[in-house]
Image (tube, helix red, strand yellow):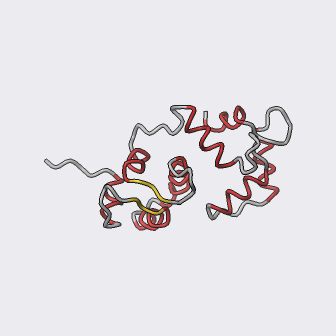
């Protein structure tokens, strides 16, 4: 009996890519929609950004396959959490501002108002400085 292909193998096959090739985020998005996985796209793209530190919006088969795996824990090590924090920390000052959230939303095609971003920050801002530091950020995913 043949082993069932992984979700990543299905996506790569539909995209007609070899395992040594990278896929663009847009191609994966389109394929996930066709497969009926639209509700999970935001989560997948958040994880994919962990593997895309240069912002090229491409991912390797190996990295995408690890995201699709049942045992995937994007924050098993602190490095992944720090990498994601750095994506949001647009000013590179070790704090996430509401403006950073708006900017990241624009990059990933999400419309987030300044008011919504301020509410997001307020909900996790334990020390009430109007910003999210790495410790506060870790409570979001911890």
Residue found at the far right of this picture = 129
- As rendered, which of 139 and 63 lies closer to the eye? 63
In percent of width and height, residue 87 lies at 64, 49
Left or right: 83, with 73 as reference point = right
Q: Residue at x 35, y 53 (%)?
A: 7
Q: Spot the residue most to the left.
A: 1
The residue that appears at 41% across and 53% down in the rendered structure is 60
- Residue at x 54%, y 47% (from the top left corner): 50
At 85% from the left edge and 36% from the top edge, which residue is drawn? 128
In the shown orientation, is residue 47 left or right of residue 119? left
**Relative to 77, residue 37 above or below:** below
Q: Is residue 25 above or below residue 75?
A: below
Q: Quadrant of the C terminus?
A: top right
- Tally of numbered discs: 0
> At which x and y percent is residue 44?
50, 52
Q: Position of residue 77 (x, y in %)?
A: 53, 31
Compared with residue 70, is residue 42 higher up or lower down, i.e. above or below? Answer: below
Q: Is residue 31 above or below residue 2?
A: below
User: Between residues 103 and 124, which one lies in front from this camera angle?
Assistant: 103
Percent from the top left, x then y, of residue 93? Answer: 76, 42
Among the 4 quarters of the image, the one containing residue 121: top right
Snapshot quadrant of residue 59:
bottom left
């Amino acid at each position: 009996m043949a082993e069932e292909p992984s979700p990543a193998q299905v996506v790569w096959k539909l995209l007609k890519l070899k395992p040594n090739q990278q896929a663009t985020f847009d191609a994966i998005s389109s394929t996930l929609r066709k497969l009926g996985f639209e509700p999970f796209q935001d989560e997948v793209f958040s994880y994919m950004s962990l593997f895309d530190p240069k912002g090229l919006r491409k991912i390797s088969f190996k990295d995408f396959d690890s995201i699709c795996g049942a045992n995937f824990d994007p924050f098993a090590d602190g490095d992944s959490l720090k990498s994601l924090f750095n994506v949001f920390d647009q000013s590179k000052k070790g704090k996430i501002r509401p403006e950073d959230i708006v900017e990241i939303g624009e990059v990933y095609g999400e419309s987030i108002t300044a008011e919504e971003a301020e509410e997001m920050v307020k909900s996790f801002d334990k020390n009430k400085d109007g910003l999210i530091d790495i410790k506060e950020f870790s409570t979001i995913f911890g």
